[in-house]
Image (cartoon, grey):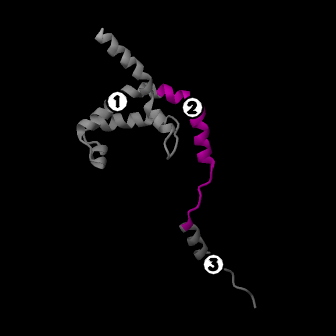
Amino acid sequence: MRATLMLLAALAAAPALVGCATSSNLFSKDECKVYGGTRLDATLISEGFSPDPEAVKANRLEPPVVAWEACCGMFDLPLSVIADTVTLPITVPVTVARLGAPPAPSAASSKDQESTVPTPASPE
């Protein structure tokens, strides 16, 4: 009976874990990438199982934490591939629009351009 309840609880929690890297890609403030959840999982896996991971140095994480993230990434990778494929109609137009838009000039660069542009001398 107890094993059946544990199995039902795990099956009920599974939809919440489906493609969680994909959901973080879709709802991130920075950018939405095509197959971004799959890319994130692949990065977690490669950093977690590399002999000298950059995440350990950069974030000062303990190696067991990075290895645990890699295991979670391995579980989430096939689910993220499916979720990323389903969300292609959302991510492709967003990516195309972002790539097609001209970059906004910053205030510092426009001031620099104004000061370096020579002004023509007026004939007198």
Q: Which residue is mark 3?
A: 118
94 or 26, which is in the foreground?
A: 26
Q: Secondary structure at mark 2?
A: helix
**Residue closest to the far bottom:** 124
Q: Which mark is residue 88?
A: 2
Residue 93 inside the magenta-drawn segment: yes
Near mark 1 (Cα within 10 A), the count class, few <14, some 14-19 or many ≥20, is some
The disc label shown at residue 102, or none: none
Q: Amino acid at mark 2?
A: Leu
Q: Quadrant of residue 116?
A: bottom right
The residue sitting at 31% across, 29% down in the picture is 71
Look at label 3 and name its amino acid. Pro
Q: Position of 105 compared to 68: left or right? A: right
Q: Main secondary structure of the magenta part?
A: helix
Q: Amino acid at mark 1?
A: Cys
Q: Nearer the viewer, residue 38 or 51?
A: 38
In which quadrant of the rendered image does the N terminus lie?
Answer: top left
Place of residue 15 in the rendered image (x, y in percent of width and height, measured from the top left):
45, 23
**Mark nearer the N terminus (1 vs 2):** 1
Relative to the observer, which residue lies in front, 15 or 2? 2
The mark closer to the camera, 3 or 1, is 1
Please give the residue where the numbered disc 1 appears in the rendered image: 72
- Sequence-earlier tag: 3 or 1: 1
Mark 3–mark 2 Cα distance, whole angstroms, equals 48 Å
State the residue at coordinates (26%, 47%): 60
Look at 40% across and 17% down and name the residue there: 11
Start-end of magenta stretch: 81-107
Q: CA distance from mark 1 to mark 2?
A: 23 Å
Distance from the alpha carbon under mark 3 to that under mark 1: 58 Å
